Image (tube, helix red, strand yellow):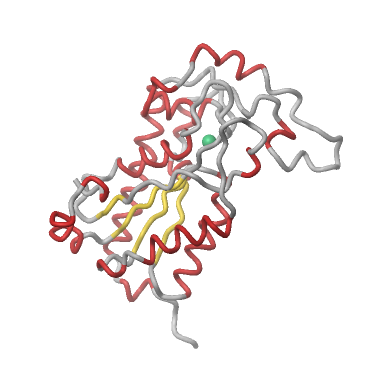
Amino acid sequence: MPILEETTTVDASEWLPDAEVAILPAGSTEQHGPAMPLCTDFMAAETVARGIADRADVAVLPTVPVGVSAHHRHFHGSLWVSEDTFESYLTEILESLPDHGVEKAVIVNGHGGNVGSIGRIANELYRSETAFVVPWSWWEGVGDTPGEVLPESTSVPGHAGAFETAMILYAAAELVRTERFEEAATGQGDGRRWPEPAPRGYDFADWTDNGIHGDPRPATAAAGEALFEAARDSLDELVDWLAAESVDNLRPREHK
Ligand SMILES: [Zn+2]
């Protein structure tokens, strides 16, 4: 089972040379309102990433659990690092892979605040011809599934609404405080700190009183399983392509 942290160096010496694509899950440890655990974003990313761990041509790397979340700092328990730190840390993790012969990767992201940084990481590694990295947030892989399994939910991924809540009900139901769904849904306030055309807000505390944006009440574990399967299948398809592609064809073009 190619989950890197669960193997040994002896076993890795046997399967790592066959690994074509590294899968790096990254998320955040941040408030998700009264009902959802702080690990929501990294657990979702890890769950989807490990969904393809039975492939012989991937190495699933350890999950990066803290991300770019300073905009959640007003709420108890949120952790964050700067964009610079996050970008350096992930870049250097990915730079350690070519030594083991792995020059392609997918960052499976679970947190909206990481998106800009992950794009810059991939761009820099491409320009430096170190590795070809696909930035991929798990909610990009779910296609039409949210409309089918959570028709009441309009916000994807939202923040601690039905979409994320369904995923965690599937992945780790024991961490979801379902008895607080009502409080979560009704305690958000009016969603605007200043009148238009002023910005809606810069921090989560500017536009939500209790830290959530959405409504967890329609979430079910079955909906979460469907979202997981859709995302996993999309990731699997992405890795099919990436594994088959030659490294040469993933380098910057020659000057015209
Ligand atoms: Zn989240």
Q: Nearer the viewer, residue 246 or 100?
A: 100
Q: Residue at x 37, y 34 (%)?
A: 228
**Side (left or right) of 151 relative to 106:** right
Counting from the top left corner in percent of width and height, residue 141 is at: 43, 44
Q: Is residue 104 above or below residue 140?
A: below
Q: Could you say where residue 230 lies in the image, as x and y percent from the top left?
A: 38, 38
Return the residue nearer the eye: 119 or 140: 119
Say which quadrant the N terminus sits in.
top left
Instruction: Kindly give the residue lying farthest to the bottom in the view shown.
Output: 256
- Image quarter of residue 175: top left
| Tally of marks | 0
> Looking at the image, which residue is at 34% across and 48% down?
62
Question: In percent of the image, x 51 and y 11: which residue is there?
Answer: 179
* Residue 46: image location, x then y, percent: 37, 41
- Which quarter of the picture shows residue 90? bottom left
Please give left or right for residue 54 compared with residue 230 in the image. Answer: left
- Using the image, determine if residue 129 lies above or below residue 71: below
Q: Is residue 93 above or below residue 42?
A: below
Q: Position of residue 50 (x, y in %)?
A: 30, 42
Residue beneath the point at 63% across and 31% down: 75
Q: Is residue 59 left or right of residue 71?
A: left
